[in-house]
Amino acid sequence: MPKSALDKDLKKVEKLEHATYALSRSIAAPGLAILFLVAIFLFMSGLAPSGPLSFFVIAGGVIAGYMALNIGANDVANNMGPAVGSRALPLGAALLIAAICEAAGAILAGGDVVNTISKNIVVPDAGFEVRDFVMLMMASFLAAGMWLHLATFLNAPVSTTHSIVGGVLGAGIAAAGFGIVAWPTMGAIAASWVISPVMGGVIAAGLLGFIKWQVLFKPDRVAAARRWVPVMIGLMAGVFAMYLSLKGLKKIYHPSTSTVWLLGLAAFVIGTVATRPWVARRAATLENRRKHVAGLFTLPLVFAAALLSFAHGANDVANAVGPLAAIVNAAETGTAVAGNVALPLWVLTIGAIGIAIGLALFGPRLIRTVGTKITKMDAPRAYCVALAAAITVLIASAMGLPVSSTHIAIGGVFGVGFLREQLANLGLKADGPKPPKPNANEPSSLSPTPEDAIRKQLKREKRRLVRRRHVLTIAAAWVITVPAAGGLAALLYTLMKMAVDF
């Protein structure tokens, strides 16, 4: 039966409604982000001190908000991506938990002090003008925010810290030449490009290997889980107790090294003993199947992801709002500060809200990339990534190495993926070793022919459980982060300088 003119018109209206809905969704997130920046502009307009640098203070507030949005969009995905990819958390719940924990970490424990020259990357002399110092900070962090924005658009999780380092480096060179740069510090940061992902990957793979051979590959997985899962949860409790006391709560608590170790040991014992009854009750209802036993890691994974988000908010909020505190201090004192500047609560609040909004509006894309597109995740694998991230930061802190939490987390994802790939190529499936199948068509006494070797190699080539395209994209983004942010910052500083001097 031919369609009437009314049916055709209604079909056109339906298509128009779908197109309008898709367009409104595409512009809603940028529109809300712009409203957030406008609100910061209005807030800073009433707060900025009077004087020749008042405009820079207002602009610095907007840049800090923009930087916080991009940290939320890019950096936070590393904490929640594995949990979402393993289906331990739905995306909405992950966004909510991350937003609350990031904001809580930023406001309650974030940024006791911030080095205004970004960890002594550049060291200006006493004659450095205040206005030039303020423009250096603005150019540095605006460039870092723009690079993070581009990386998020390209689906590449990059290091916020390295973006800021590159921005400070480029703007500093543009402002005062190569002599302003502390090159030994830059050398240590460059070394961390390799150290961070390798440490995270090796530790995550080691943890996953332990779980596989001690639990998942055992004939009686349930009994093995009753023995070892409480120990793994206790290890998580101990590591995060040490991690938070050293990194996440440094604003309100400064324990000695021995105290940190005692806290970790106590948390390990308490966590192990306290979770044994819970694991025993859960294990009593489980079948001796890998999928059922792996589910015991789901709840610990949620806690690990939440704790990582809290610690990330406490540490990285200074990356977003540190320049604002430095600019405000310079405007009030009239001096270019090269020391430590306290972060007021209202500055931390701007950073916390910006990170939460950026995560909610733009974070899902990177969360899916980290959680599902690099390698397949389940609860034990994601748990190993989260625990490896905390362990690696602790080791790096003890060794004095400047590492990137982003590189560590992504390295952990690669580590568990390549371990799975290697085990698959060795014939070890997810359920453990299998007895060899007899080949009825070929006598066992015959040696393999060249054709057999070719077939075996082709079969092995198919067992690629880590997507190489993402490996190359992310590695390339890591390598060019510092020079890209540095070149952009140098250009922005030059343009600002020309505009002000004109």
Image: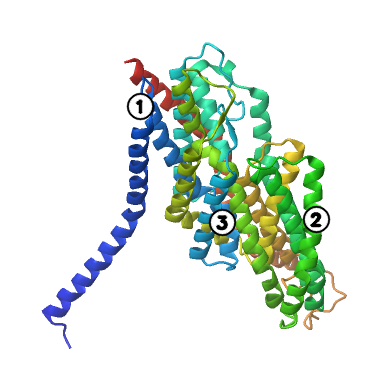
Q: In which quarter of the image is the C terminus?
A: top left
Residue matched to label 2: 266
Residue matched to label 1: 55
Considering only order in the chain, which callout, 3 or 1, is on the residue closer to the N terminus? 1
Q: Report whether residue 43 is seen.
A: yes
Q: Where residue 273 appears, x then y in whole percent?
A: 80, 66
Q: Report whether residue 200 is seen.
A: no
Q: Is residue 223 above or below residue 26?
A: below
Residue 370 disc label? 3
Circle 2: is it few (<14), some (14-19), or many (20+) Cα within 10 Å? Answer: some
Front disc: 1 or 3: 1
Q: Disc 1 marks which amino acid?
A: Phe
Q: Where residue 376 appears, x then y in whole percent?
A: 61, 64
Q: Disc 3 marks which amino acid?
A: Val
Q: Is mark 3 on a helix, strand or loop?
A: helix
Considering only order in the chain, which callout, 3 or 2, is on the residue closer to the N terminus? 2
Q: Where residue 387 appears, x then y in whole percent?
A: 70, 56
Foreground residue, 68 or 454? 68
Circle 3: is it few (<14), some (14-19), or many (20+) Cα within 10 Å? Answer: many
